[in-house]
Amino acid sequence: MSDVVLETRDLVKHFPLTRGIVFKKQYGAVQAVDGVSLQLRRGETLGIVGESGCGKSTLARLLVGLETPTSGDLFVQGKNMSKVSAEERRRGRRNIQLVMQDPYTSLNPRMTVGDIVGEPFEVHPDVLPKARRRAKVQELLDLVGLNPDHITRYPHQFSGGQRQRIGIARALALNPEIILCDEPVSALDVSIQAQVINLLEKLQKELGLSYVFIAHDLSVVRHIADRVAVMYLGKIIEIGTEDEIYDNPTHPYTQALLSAVPVPDPRRRGHRDQIVLTGDVPSPANPPSGCRFRTRCWKAQDICAEQQPLLEIRDKSGHPSACHFAEVRDVVHASE
């Protein structure tokens, strides 16, 4: 447990749905995150994948303290963030920083690069004396592969990949141990994606960082992640090592996701049994009873509507899966 730097226990975030202008009455809730339990170990990269709207970004906001959980516990380096003072919670947030998805909107266009990267020192003035901040900002820019002399430039003078490097430099300013990457390469060209991923891996080795890497691109996640958690409608439905998830997926949803990844080699495409899901993703304001995936699952039976499957080891695969009928299925994916 001493190696666990970040942990959630039954973390829940429901957004209330209300009627009325003056006297608002709640008539329901959007169950964005519903009972998520995860652990991130020191030096590890935990990938979180799933369709748009499954709760990945809401989970990211909970982990960095931008949202307050409805219930559940969040531990950062062993401290329960919901049971410490406001000042301790503020200091604890230094240890977990966020790299945002869109480098074109996450940087203030009216601020110079020096001001953007140095802004964390304004929020936490006790971290570094003012006289040393300019040199530190230049050091951070050099660390992420940018010219330290460009400290007075503005975001519009940089490319998308360079802007994301600026965002990474800002996240590193307070010397955090945990970096949360919320789809950090989805807005970039493929060639630039590889450069940013390589930079993140280099920084992890040099600085001993731990990553939570959220993405919808399964190929990118496989390249960088040590363990992978699959989300569907606010819940973790399968979790395991990179090899376990990609080579031996047991949950039908995971199998469907992997079967949808394009295979570049045309000779291998005919060897894949592609899974085509029917129906739309249910509303998180009114999720199905029992298993939330049952309305789109070809294995669904009566028990799936009656009992919610627990996330537990169910077959010879050796990793947890939340399915009553979990079993290994061969999947041909893009990396093969």
Image (cartoon, rainbow, N blue to C red):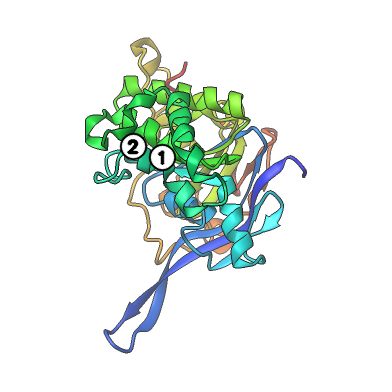
Question: 138 left or right of 305?
Answer: left
Q: Toward which corner of the image does residue 333 lie, by quadrant?
A: top left
Amino acid type at image mark 1: Val
**Crowd tier of the residue under label 1, counting other residues whose Cα lies within 10 Å: few below 14, some 14–19, many 20 or above:** many
Q: Toward which corner of the image does residue 153 lie, by quadrant?
A: top left
Quarter of the figure that contains the N terminus? top right
Is residue 331 visible from the viewing direction of this image? no
Q: Give the residue furthest to the left.
A: 156
Q: How far apart are marks 2 and 1 (CA)?
A: 6 Å
Residue 90 location, x and y as percent?
A: 57, 58
Residue 100 location, x and y as percent?
A: 39, 43
Residue linked to disc 2: 113
User: Residue at 39% of width from left, 81% of height from top?
Assistant: 26
Question: 326 left or right of 300?
Answer: right
Q: Toward which corner of the image does residue 25 lie, by quadrant?
A: bottom left
Q: Give the residue furthest to the bottom.
A: 23
Asked if marks 2 and 1 touch (Cβ < 8 Å), the reply is yes
Residue linked to disc 1: 117
